[in-house]
Image: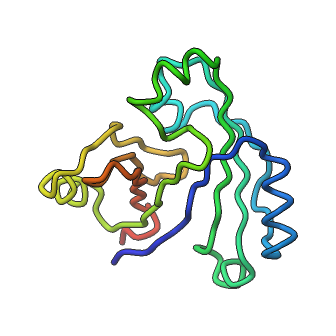
Amino acid sequence: MIQLRHIGLYVENLDKETEFYKSVFHMYPICEKIKQADTLLIDLLKHVNASILVTKLITDQGKKNGMDDMLELIQVTAPTQCMVKNISKMNIYTPRCLHLGFGIDNIEETIDKILLRNGKQYTAIHLMENGNKCCFCKDPEENWLELIESCNNKT
């Protein structure tokens, strides 16, 4: 089973973008301005002294379903020289860059498929506090992919 869980949008002004999506698309906040300290994004930015704030918004349909239809707004603040120096290597944190978050059954099998099709794995598989497994990869055209194996899918 594969499902599109969320879209991650990197923004310059988290407050302004949050208000826009709440007002225009009537999205509901799941969490707002949460400071990320020990996440995959920190792993991606390991050599940059970055600060990460995240707001997650869900549509009315997502709220009814209890999942999916989510937009993750991410604001990364890092020293300018670090962002410029590393921009060609690691563009995931630049404004207007996206990653696609996929809910999958088996993260290891999915990574193997990505690698076989000229994609790349960029982080180790992380075990999250909720028991989910997660990692970042890229497709052959360098688009960011977040893979999430839910602990709830296991029987």
Q: Is residue 107 left or right of residue 5?
A: left
User: What is the x, y in percent for residue 107?
Assistant: 30, 56
> Splitting the image into 4 quarters, where does residue 44 fall?
top left
User: What is the x, y in percent for residue 119?
Assistant: 23, 51
Q: Quadrant of the C terminus?
A: bottom left
Q: In front here: 148 or 138?
A: 138
Q: In front here: 85 or 93?
A: 85
Vertical side of 154 occupied by 121: above or below: above
Residue drawn at 44 percent across, 61 percent down: 151
User: What is the x, y in percent for residue 11?
Assistant: 68, 46
Q: Quadrant of the N terminus?
A: bottom left
Furthest-left residue in view?
A: 116
Vertical side of 67 occupied by 97: above or below: above
Residue drawn at 86 percent across, 59 percent down: 19
User: What is the x, y in percent for residue 117?
Assistant: 15, 58
| Picture mark count | 0
Residue drawn at 78 percent across, 65 percent down: 21
Vertical side of 117 occupied by 53: above or below: above
Q: In front here: 142 or 52?
A: 142
Q: Is residue 112 left or right of residue 138?
A: left
Q: In front here: 66 or 83?
A: 83
